[in-house]
Amino acid sequence: MSTTHTDGTHTDTAGTTHTGTAGTGAAGTGTSHTGEATLDRIDRLRLSSVTLPLAAPVSDAKVLTGRQKPMTEVAFLFVEIGTEQGLEGIGFSYSKRAGGPGQFAHAREIADCLLGEDPSDIGRIWTKLVWAGASVGRSGLATQAVAAYDIALWDLKARRAGLPLAKLLGAHRDSVRCYNTSGGFLHTPTEELLENAAAALAGGIGGIKIKVGHPDGRHDLARVAAVREHIGDGVPLMVDANQQWDRPTARRMGRALEPYGLVWIEEPLDAYDARGHAALAASLDTPVATGEMLASVAEHTELIRHGAADVIQPDAPRIGGITQFLKLAALAEHHQLELAPHFAMEIHLHLAAAYPLEPWVEHFDWLEPLFNERLEIADGRMRLSARPGLGITLSDQARAWTVAEHEAGVRA
């Protein structure tokens, strides 16, 4: 058994003395919850704020309604965690248009809470980190900062086991249906939209999603008709209104879109309009998908309680990480909902592979420059690799795009 000394060090069964502040907060207070079952401890971490520039400004319906400006970059919060035994894990969160510096600042404030903790105790660490910043809430920016830590801990646990994360969780499949979004934004002319769809399908993608929500609905219908004719009736096609329709418009557009055999209509209404989504879902043959903008399991639970979605679209970095995603996935399965996680395919491939019902994963090529590895896509599906954990490492380009860093522990 290990012995804890008055100076805070502890000696394990091999006679090795370790340092650490297990169970302590940023101020070094708290009670240790580790004992002889603790075989490793977190002794270092690095935070990186990375700004990814987009090749061209991106517009969806929120831009056309004047609520947002075109998106030119995505801010990422990367967390790299290391342990006394030399293991490492990587996780990330992100923010579009605004919020990136805030995520980094909050993650930096609570960083010391991890030092000395057993990295296997992921659920307890998540709770500890949330309570460290409880005054700013348990959703939104605060838990998105926690998510990066949580994802890194799951990556580390899977690497320790020598397994891809999906296999650690218990995979139901080794590949997942995937659809492309990045080629279908509203700023894209129709001819280019068709070219992008054809290229995505030729590259092995299984489905195509395009943005709708133009102030003139006839423009949306013409684009959907053109894409459907171009790709054929047998190719899965989805549309996404990015919350920009009101209830009457969503009903009219939903009925007008029925002939195109869509897999789903995404975010037809405000993300928090559970009753409106439920009424719409009940009135259409086309499934309704939503959830990507929600920032907690509790918010998703409200959607499910109202029967507001046929397809639920959680985003692990947005709802607090993998620990929270797994809770939501269990609830979604109980209600027999389809699952199509939003963005971050490097994370969501693993989580979708572990979902019992056949899911979808969203393909964005935007993030590829950040990593040394590429995901394999063929025959309409995204495939798991044999690489342990998430199977990703940060590229030199990601390091070059880093705008702020913070280190804690033995490297600090």
Image (cartoon, rainbow, N blue to C red):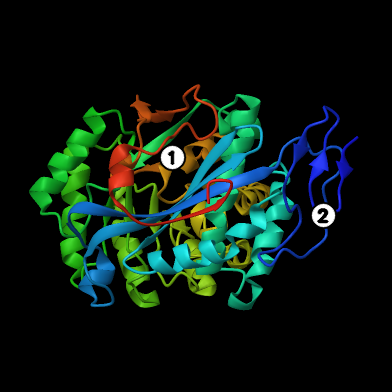
Q: Position of residue 345 (x, y in %)?
A: 42, 42
Number of numbered callouts drawn: 2
Which residue corresponds to the image point at 40% horizontal and 67% vertical from the top-left? 101
Instruction: Name the one closer to the observer, 186 or 119.
Output: 119
Residue highlighted by disc 1: 346
Residue corresponding to mark 2:
32
On the image, the x and y values in percent for residue 177 come to: 42, 34
Whether residue 108 is visible to the viewer of this picture, yes or no, is yes
Which amino acid, mark 2? Ser
Residue occupying the point 64% across, 29% down: 160
Q: Are marks 2 and 1 in contact (CB under 8 Å)?
A: no
Judged left or right of residue 273, residue 123 is right
Seen from the viewer's position, the closer of residues 100 and 255 is 100
Question: Dot 2: few (<14), some (14–19), or many (≥20) neighbours within 10 Å?
Answer: few
Secondary element at tag 1: helix
Residue at 64%, 47% in the rendered image: 326
